[in-house]
Image: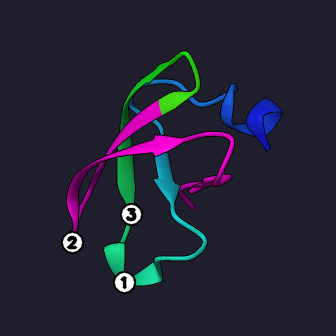
Amino acid sequence: MKELNSLLEPGMLVRHPDQPDWGTGQVQSNIGGRITVNFREQGKVVLDSERVTLLPVHDG
């Protein structure tokens, strides 16, 4: 899980696989296994990359 999350950079759009109602989120930071994401419907959330793998959202 951590390996996939390590590719996330600020500005990238993601979804939380277990919280679809949070909507799309924008990565704010990814430092030391802690990923801060601003989700449209949930607001700012800090996630542990060891516990969840975020799903990248691709425009198109």
The residue at the point 46 percent across, 34 percent down is: 35
- The label on residue 24 is 3
Q: Residues within 10 Å of mark 3 (few under 14, many from 20)?
A: many
Q: Position of residue 36 (x, y in %)?
A: 36, 36
Instruction: Find residue 41 and name its label.
Output: 2
Q: Which residue is mark 1?
A: 21
The residue depicted at 69 percent of the width and 26 percent of the height is: 6
Q: Secondary structure at mark 1?
A: helix
Farthest top residue in view: 32
**In x, y percent, where is residue 20?**
46, 80
**Among numbered discs 3 and 2, the one appearing first in the sequence:** 3
Image quadrant containing the N terminus? top right
Numbered disc in front, either 3 or 1: 1
Is residue 9 placed above or below 18 in the rendered structure? above
Marks 3 and 1, how far apart in space?
Answer: 9 Å
Q: Position of residue 39 (x, y in %)?
A: 29, 58
> Residue 41, located in which quarter of the rendered image?
bottom left
Quadrant location, the C terminus: bottom right
Q: Which residues are magenta?
A: 35-60
User: What crowding class fits label 2: few (fewer than 14 Cα within 10 Å), some (14-19), or many (20 or more)?
Assistant: few
Q: How far is the residue under mark 3 from the one under mark 2?
A: 8 Å
